[in-house]
Image (cartoon, helix red, strand yellow):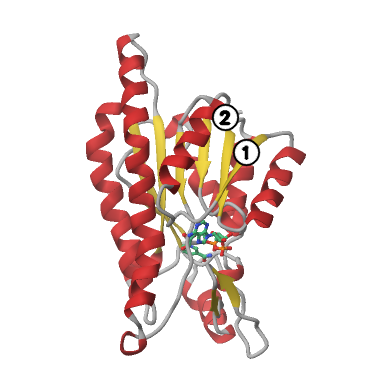
């Protein structure tokens, strides 16, 4: 139990990778604040954590709502009296080639992937500074962890995702900047960029695939089967898409004491994907 006594906040933890992160961190002893904008899935994650013997509470709402960041941080402090790990995972894609992409489409994707993590980290700044000062005054070195989620789209670009690639590239800049600002508070700020992980986002796309409701919008998620085959046979040396558990394991590496002297870094969790 490497995370015994820690308090972790995970956004977008109602499904997919975020749920696997919440379950993994709780399984290692952390108490988890589970966020999702969809209440039902958030509750299912709580059930999964509790069924495995872990502790979790929900903070339902969109990370883009005004005041959400402060409410999220307060939930951790009020419920579990701590703030040790923040995983900025919530997100969605809304693809289109540049000539067809609307301002709304571009901005909505930046809002969720860039502005929301910025606000959450800003809301956490004051409590983290206070806790770090108390710990320093008592001669203790306590490391906190921020793990921001990026994508190979942000590192290498991806046709049809100018909004998402811009957002996920910005996440890297934010990570490196905050690593420099928060080193003095003993916060490790790192980034995990996923390749292709099996979730609804990367389901095989065909004519019968139903659109997904995201924040009141109908979005057609998925990857063309021919592209999945090309990925598995040519672009991913390990020969397949990743599981959500494998994705969560990458995040976990940045949450454990063994990574206490690593900050400002980006690792790709993608089976060696070339991008
Ligand atoms: N699946 C992949 O291959 C892949 C690759 C690279 C990066 N990522 C990133 O990993 C993260 C998780 O993706 P996933 O594949 O698990 O997707 P998913 O759709 O399975 O899960 C994302 C969860 O985030 C929630 N969410 C979306 N917008 C939100 C908002 N505004 N406020 C609160 N919750 C919100 C959704 O309701 C959903 O439960 C995202 O940041 C995504 O961009 C995924």
Residue drawn at (69%, 49%), measured in percent from left and top? 43
Secondary structure at numbered mark 2 = helix
Q: Between 207 and 127, which is closer to the camera in this rendering? A: 127
**Where in the figure is residue 107, as x and y percent of width and height?**
34, 70
Q: How many marks?
A: 2
Q: Are marks 2 and 1 in contact (CB under 8 Å)?
A: yes
Quarter occupied by the C terminus: bottom left
Tag 1: Cα neighbours inside 10 Å, few (<14), some, or many (≥20)? Answer: many
Ligand 1 under 8 Å from disc 1 Cβ: no
- Tag of residue 77: none
Residue 209, horizontal then vertical, whole percent: 65, 83
- Using the image as rendered, state which of residue 73 and residue 135 is in the foreground: 73
Specify whether 109 is left or right of 72.
Answer: left
Q: Looking at the image, can residue 254 be seen?
A: no
Q: Nearer the viewer, residue 7 or 112?
A: 112
CA neighbours of label 2 inside 10 A, class few (<14), some (14 to 19), many (20+): few
Q: Nearer the viewer, residue 119 or 138?
A: 119
Residue positioned most to the top: 138
Rendered position, 22 above or below 259: below
Distance from the alpha carbon under mark 2 to that under mark 1: 8 Å
- Residue hosting label 2: 79
Q: Where is residue 196 drawn, in percent x and y?
A: 51, 67
Q: Is residue 267 above or below residue 57?
A: below
Which residue lies under the disc numbered 1? 57
Q: Quadrant of residue 259?
A: top left
Name the image quarter holding the N terminus. top right
Q: Residue 128's x, y, as percent?
A: 36, 29
Determine the residue positioned at 64% across, 44% down.
Answer: 23
Element type at marker 1?
strand
Q: Residue 224 appears in which quarter of the rendering?
A: bottom right
Residue at (31, 15) in percent of width and height: 136
């Amino acid at each position: 139990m490497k995370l015994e006594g820690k308090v972790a906040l995970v956004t977008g933890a109602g499904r997919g990778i975020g749920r696997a992160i919440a379950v993994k961190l709780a399984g290692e002893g952390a108490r988890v604040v589970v966020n999702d904008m969809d209440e039902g899935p958030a509750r299912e994650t709580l059930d999964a954590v509790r069924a495995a013997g872990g502790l979790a509470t929900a903070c339902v709402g969109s990370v883009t709502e005004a005041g959400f960041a402060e409410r999220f941080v307060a939930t951790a402090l009020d419920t579990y009296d701590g703030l040790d790990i923040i995983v900025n995972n919530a997100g969605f894609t809304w693809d289109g080639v540049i000539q067809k992409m609307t301002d709304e489409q571009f901005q909505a994707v930046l809002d969720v992937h860039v502005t929301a993590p910025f606000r959450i980290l800003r809301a956490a700044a004051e409590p983290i500074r206070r806790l770090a000062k108390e710990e320093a005054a008592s001669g203790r070195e306590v490391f906190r962890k921020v793990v921001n989620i990026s994508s190979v789209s942000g590192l290498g670009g991806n046709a049809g995702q100018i909004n998402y690639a811009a957002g996920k590239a910005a996440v890297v800049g934010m990570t490196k900047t905050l690593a420099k600002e928060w080193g003095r508070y003993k916060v490790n700020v790192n980034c995990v960029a996923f390749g292709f992980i099996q979730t609804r986002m990367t389901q095989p796309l065909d004519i019968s695939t139903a659109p997904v409701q995201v924040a009141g919008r109908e979005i057609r998620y998925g990857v063309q089967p021919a592209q999945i085959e090309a990925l598995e046979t040519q672009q991913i040396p390990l020969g397949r898409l990743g599981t959500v558990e494998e994705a969560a394991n990458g995040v976990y590496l940045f949450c454990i004491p063994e990574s206490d002297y690593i900050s400002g870094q980006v690792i790709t969790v993608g089976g060696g994907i070339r991008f």
